[in-house]
Amino acid sequence: MKKQSLIKGTMILGLATIFARFLGLFFRIPIQQLIGDEGMGYYQMSYPLYMTFVAIASGVPIAMSKLISEFNAKQDVHAVRSVLSQTLKIMIPLGFVASFLMLYFGKQIIDVLKWDVSSYNSFMVISLGPIFVCIMCTFKGYFQGMQNMNSTAVSQVLEQFGRVIFGVLFAYLLLPKGIAYAAAGAAFGTVAGGIVGSIYLVIKYFKVEKGVPKVKGKKERRITGMILDAALPISVGAAVGTIMSLIDSIIVPQRLLTAGFTSAESATLYGQFTGKAMTIQNVPLALSMALCASLVPIISEVYALHNRSELERRVNMVFKLSFVIGIPSFLGLFFLARPVMGLVFMGDIGGHEILKLLSITLPLIIITQTTTSVLQSCGKYMTPVYYLGVGCIFKVVITYFLVANPQFNIFGAIIGSIVGYAVTAMLNIIEVKKLLRVKISLNEIIIKPLFISLIMIIAVVFIYNNVYNYTMSNGISCILAVFVGVIIFGILAILFRVFTIEDVMGKLNRN
């Protein structure tokens, strides 16, 4: 398979992920209309626990993609195949065990975490997901390790199509039985999407495999050990990151009750926070996740080859991409929180103030994710895990005390996230500079993206206000302002040479 540059791989996977996120938004619109903020709260209570498993499972494919990239650079075909086969032997049993535990101990888990009992049906349905997550993640890891993001990109789009179609369909069919059952129908969309994505990747792999010659070798035991040695700390690190969301699902609803809100009001606020504001926030984060998926094999390759000049270039590119994604995304959602919320949820602007404050976390989350991936690409698996743990401690303490205060309520959880990610990002950046000893150009990675982002947002707000005064349509005004903003940012990025043709095409990748 043909390798892709960091930017090209990120663009392919990022655009596909963003498209998938938009499909997810279309999923949320009818679901929101069907089950409302309260039903969304029931659905979202179990979702962070499911995503925690996804994060734990993701450690194996990330480690796998790193190993495949290194073996592929040495043209060791047998070792590449062995990595895939040994990973499947680890992941498939893991998926079955996780699903069994969630199904068998579902009531006990909900009781211990003190979730609303109405979330039980959603939890039972989503418990089937880990099996297919493990299959899908493994084959994604294979294609990412080969530095070709096309198959992963297509699988994400197909996965989201499955989620939208089946989730909306079953939510609608089960609505007569009540909101709790409709929320469970929506949860089934997640499982169905995993099935569709898994089937596509398996078929794609066998098509690609036909053109690869058969080579014999004996490296299974050594490879299994290498996968586990790398995967365990990566899994722990990924789990600590998603635990911030799990913390919210455990602490926030209960502390809102302490603050004086009713059970229904607590579920509604939590639904606005996770089901609406975080859903919109996840659209720009899709680019960050695509960047992380692209950079692990690309950074690990040059680090293994001790190519310091290329390593420095790629690390600077990673930081630049992080801020190019994070800064304009933060400014856009901060200044257009109300219009964007109204656009996405068809005039329902409940939670737009939550989205406005939540946007501050965007650049912090992105730089945390990318620096974690850089460190783990270079073999520093546990260090970012420790730093994420430190950030989580800040998050827990602040969330616990502020959410129970009626003046802060749900906003206390966001403040906790801001502080937690800021601490983690700062520690990660210091560690990257200390480990790699690379020169980081502040002008290129921060000042230029910030300058063109400020020009962009001024233009976007101006366009929105004037078009709205003329048309009195929030949808037209918001879409036009965002579209023009993207064009302005792209033009300024070219004029100020934020990226070059060589960066995009990857001509400098093989020095």
Image (tube, rainbow, N blue to C red):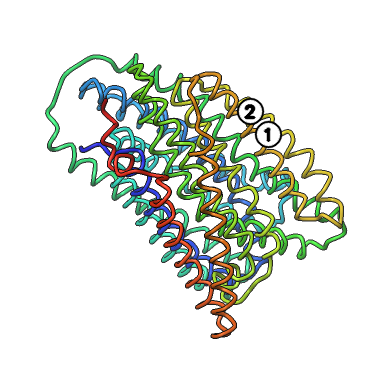
Q: Is residue 416 above or below residue 473?
A: above
How crowded is the residue under tag 2: few (<14 C-alpha within 10 Å), some, or many (20+)?
A: many
Mark 1 → mark 2, Cα distance in angstroms: 6 Å
Q: Give x and y (percent) for residue 341.
A: 60, 68
- The residue singled out by tag 2 in the image is 427
**Residue shown at 35%/26% (left/top)?**
310
Query: Are discs 1 and 2 less than 8 Å apart at CB?
Result: yes
Q: What amino acid type is highlighted by mark number 2? A: Leu
Three-letter amino acid code of the residue under disc 1: Val
Residue 59 disc label: none
Residue 234 location in percent, x, y? 50, 28
Against 421, residue 110 (above or below) is below
Q: Which residue is mark 1?
A: 423
Element class at badge 1:
helix
Q: Pick the quarter of the image with the N terminus.
A: top left
Q: Is 373 left or right of 220, judged from the image as shown?
A: right
Q: Position of residue 398 (x, y in %)?
A: 79, 41
Left or right position of 7 against 22: left
> In the image, is residue 244 above or below residue 374?
below
Q: Quadrant of residue 393?
A: top right
Q: Could you tell me residue 322's position as x and y percent?
A: 50, 42
